Amino acid sequence: MCGISGIVNFEGIPVDDGALRAMMHAMKHRGPDDDGIFTEKGVGLGFVRLSILDLSPAGHQPMFSPDERYVMIYNGEVFNYLELRKELETKGHTFRTQTDTEVVLAAYREWGHDMLHKLNGMWALVIYDRRDETIFAARDRYGVKPFCYYLDSERFIFASEIPSILQVLDKKPTPDEASIFDFLVFDRTDQTDNTFFREIRKLKHGHYLKLNVASGRLNGKRPEPVKWYDLRNELKEPFKDPDEFREMFQSSIDLRLRSDVPVGVCLSGGLDSSAIASTLLKQFGKTDLNTFSAVYGEGKEGDESAFIDLYRHDLKRMYYIRPDENMLLKDIPDFVFAHAEPVPSTSPYAQFKVMELARRHVTVTLDGQGADEALAGYHYFFGFYFKELLLTGRIGRLTSEVGQYLRKHRSLYGLKSLLFFLSPLAMRTRLRAMEKGYLDPGFYQDHAANATVIAGDLYGSRTLQEALINHFEYKLEHLLKWEDSNSMWFSIEARVPFLDYRLVERTLTLDDKLIIDKGMTKKILREAMKGVLPEAIRVRRDKIGFGTPQDEWFRKPVFREYIEDLIYSKPFASRGFMDVKKVQDIYRKHVNREGNHAKLIWKWIHLENWFHQFVDSPAEVRVPRYAE
């Protein structure tokens, strides 16, 4: 796991080593163990390394092919590299290192971009063909590893993180208002190739990009990314039963245990992370497993100590951190810089602190991201399922499922979600904006009609399967970006077993009853984990994840002063996105316990801090204390 960066000058102007070094320094936390650069004919490649496989200097990058035609920089891990290595050896390739990097480079030499379909893992890579003078950049299937870039007629600048690009952009970045609108209205980011910076885009998951460096100026012809992986076209036969699902899940975990450094699990106490921990414990005998959890005290919002503690008798290396309002206030500058784009809740902050804790003990973690998108883990998926049953005329099944849902959850949220998903596209956007209650009317009018990806494609899904696939297309990526930012800030590689493509492609074709049944989600996972998971976790109905007691934090005196200074400030009033008087009234109501508006409040805090760090003045590089 590493950080990659580069500059390509289309007119062949040599790339300054100092510029590359500045880009690398801005993300040194991604690779504190080694670094390297390559420059030639207007092409400059930079690399910082976090050593995971083959810790020797043989894993140094940029890496050259044996004939030195190709130069590669690569961020990620390909977990099936041993199997690919054997296949490539039968075709005459020889290897001098034990790295997956060398295997990926040999695979490109053998199969070209078709090799992407053979890789099982997570990656963002760039390969420079010195003979043909072309740049090939590619990203993994689901967007586990990031790739951001700036492109104009003269330059192509890319990096694993946005602050790296800002170091050499030579212009003041401008905010992308469409991204801000989706963030404020829908709590969503990353559903398109836009970022919060108008000048910077991201290569979407499952895409590659090819540039002809020798052609000189682009002359207005912007190269278009190519979608090499389309989940809808890759779906396979469903699992026959929970046992077959469990075998594939175990295979995914087994691949992701390949490491030359210590491995741990971020344990929230929920079904997904617990499934990973229990499988490691019972199927792989990992009694020395390290686990890392955020807790807040019994009875507090977000605390899952009761479920986490079910492992106390089996695991001896369980570590805890207790985030509070003082920690958050102190960490805001680093957290904002680490993410470089706003996030809509403090849940990623809880994960940020868990990664800080994990850094003292391991270099690799296994995490549960992706299970909610593949197995309908979010509560609103009941709305999609009810919608499908209604539209397909399965009224008996609908009546039964609604009844089971109401009995088990004692909530109307699933039915409210159904009504929302049945409403017209324009109404969905308006309803989301109205429930927030503080958007500036002019800002809403400027952007509401263009919010079609979320309100249309995502919320407009007609079946449960379509909703799950659309979550992989338009929703999952922001969670993966947040996890990458959190883990890499502390020089940790986060691996996600639920996103093994072999598992995903067969899960998304399961019969609905193996996803949602009798008012419960994740049916096949729950069945597969019988006798593996503690029963209290296996049959849990609630979902918290890395939640926090943010509602109480924002009522504390230390935050009241901070928030009031922010929402009464001139810069905040000048943004033009919100009705400031309504914002101030909402916060007053929150303090007086006339409602819980913590999610709205955090978005104001993060967005304003993002403006301060990245837009109002040149971004000043922040380096984690351990990496200084």
Image: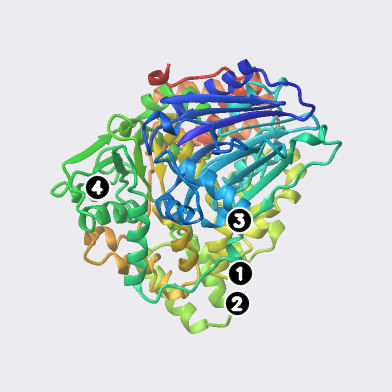
Q: Amino acid at mark 4?
A: Ile
**Whole-Å distance between the Cαs marked 3 and 2?**
40 Å
From the image, tell me which residue sits under label 3. Answer: 114
Local secondary structure at mark 2: helix
Mark closest to the chain's N terminus, 4 or 1: 4
C-alpha distance separating marks 1 and 2: 8 Å
Across and down, in percent, residue 564 comes to: 52, 23
Are the residues at dot 1 and dot 2 in contact (C-beta closer than 8 Å)? yes
Q: Is residue 225 left or right of residue 164?
A: right
Please tell me how crowded label 3 is: few (under 14), some (14-19), or many (20+) other residues with Cα within 10 Å: few
Mark linked to residue 462: 1
Q: Which residue position is annotated with label 4?
A: 308
Quarter holding the N terminus is top left
Circle 1 packing at 10 Å, graded few (<14), some (14-19), many (20+), is many
Determine the CA span between mark 2 and mark 4.
Answer: 40 Å
Label 2 amino acid?
Leu
For the C terminus, the quadrant is top left
- Is 75 drawn above or below residue 565 in the view shown? below
Disc 1 versus disc 3: nearer the observer: 3
Pointer 3 or 4: first along the chain: 3
